[in-house]
Image (spheres, rainbow, N blue to C red):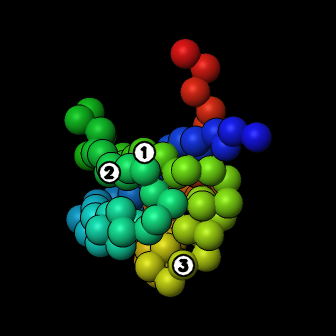
Amino acid sequence: MHEVELFIVARFHARPGHENAVSEALKANMEPTRAEPGCVHIKCFRARRDPRLFFIHSCFKNEAAFDLHATLPHTVRMIERVEPLIDHPLDVNRLERIG
């Protein structure tokens, strides 16, 4: 059976005044995640028209690789840092390519 890559898009909208803290927390998670064997790629973005809005776009080899990623200490730390700084519930979407 062929394993299908899993794409992830996570959205983070910072509370007013917490943009830099959110940015730093997300950026700090990039290198440890890139070092994971199941990570194909990961990038962090900031919206041009809303400086409080951030996204992580990543690709993992499969669902199991992402499930493991979610339990690793650097990921858990990042979520614990970011959740109080955003103005919405955590918004992480598992996607599949359709075109």
Kindly state the secondary structure of the residue where label 3 is placed.
loop
Q: Quadrant of the C terminus?
A: top right
Sequence-wise, which precedes: disc 1 or disc 2? 2
Labels 1 and 2 touching (C-beta < 8 A): no
Asked whether, in this view, residue 66 is left or right of residue 51, the answer is: right
- Residue pictured at 62% horizontal, 33% vertical: 96
Task: Name the residue nearer the viewer: 51 or 97.
Answer: 97
Determine which residue is flagged by label 3: 72
Sequence-wise, which precedes: disc 1 or disc 3? 1
Kindly state the secondary structure of the residue where label 2 is placed.
strand
- Residue pictured at 43% horizontal, 50% vertical: 40
Dot 3, crowdedness within 10 Å: few (<14), some or many (≥20)? Answer: few
Determine which residue is flagged by label 1: 57
Instruction: Report x, y in % for residue 53.
Output: 36, 46
Determine which residue is flagged by label 2: 44
- Residue pictured at 44% horizontal, 74% vertical: 78
Instruction: Report x, y in % for residue 30.
Output: 32, 64
Instruction: Report x, y in % for residue 55.
Output: 40, 47
Kindly state the secondary structure of the residue where label 1 is placed.
strand
Labels 2 and 3 touching (C-beta < 8 A): no
Asked whether, in this view, residue 2 is left or right of residue 80, the answer is: right
Kindly identify the amino acid type of the residue bearing the numbered disc 1. Answer: His
Relative vertical location of residue 24 with respect to residue 64 in this rendering, above or below: below
